[in-house]
Image: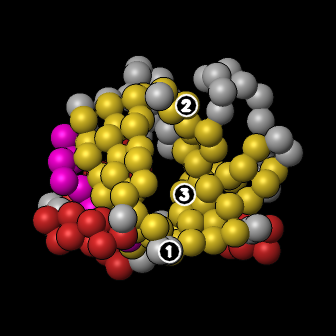
Amino acid sequence: MIEIERKFLVTSKAFKTQASAEKKISQGYLNSDPERTVRVRIANDKGFLTIKGKGNESGMSRFEWENEIPVDEASALLALSEKGAIDKTRFEIKVGNHTYEVDEFYGENEGLVIAEIELSSENEAFEKPEWLGEEVTNDERYYNAYLSKNPFTYWK
């Protein structure tokens, strides 16, 4: 139940031509405390409840528990969520032996595009596509829970 993940900014829309799948995601937070976030998500026609712990010092590893829940229950929980829902499209792109999940954000986070890759260890090697930019793994501003309260379009 430990997630090892690295995050990067995306420098161009070239990733879209390489995507094998995409899904529309709406999510909200029942608790956005960095020690233990509780997220509810609807991805296409499925609902999910996720609990994440605080990241380790590198920001790459943290506890994650996720279960699928009925979409009507996810909708009801979204209605109870803290202010600041996240809307995005997630694109899946296979690069070498890994799959990148690239999130293109909308609404108050319009203009932000982040790529994530899950690894089996913090020092696992992986291929970096040409559209992959600066690493932001340990920058909490790029966590969805932070973006829900401090939208990207307000940063400047």
Q: Determine which of the numbered discs, if any, sits on residue 155 in the image.
A: none
- The answer to whether residue 22 is above or below residue 51 is below
Q: Which residue is mark 1?
A: 44
Residue 154 visible to an observer of this rendering: no
Q: Is residue 153 left or right of residue 114?
A: left
Q: Nearer the viewer, residue 2 or 57?
A: 2
Q: Which residue is mark 2?
A: 4
Q: Is residue 68 left or right of residue 15?
A: left
Q: Are marks 1 and 2 in contact (CB under 8 Å)?
A: no
Determine the residue located farthest toward the front in the rendered image: 70
Q: Residue at x 41, y 35 (%)?
A: 64
Q: Amino acid at mark 3?
A: Ile
Residue 128 placement (x, y as % from top left): 77, 45
Q: Position of residue 69 (x, y in %)?
A: 37, 58
Q: Name the residue type under label 1.
A: Asn
Task: Say whether disc 3 or disc 2 marks the residue closer to the N-terminus.
Answer: 2
Main SS of the magenta segment?
strand
Q: Which residues are magenta?
A: 26-33
Secondary structure category for the residue under label 2? strand
Alpha carbon of mark 1 to alpha carbon of mark 2: how far?
25 Å
Give me the C-alpha separation between circle 3 and circle 1.
19 Å
Disc 3 versus disc 2: distance between alpha carbons?
16 Å
Residue 88 among those drawn in magenta: no
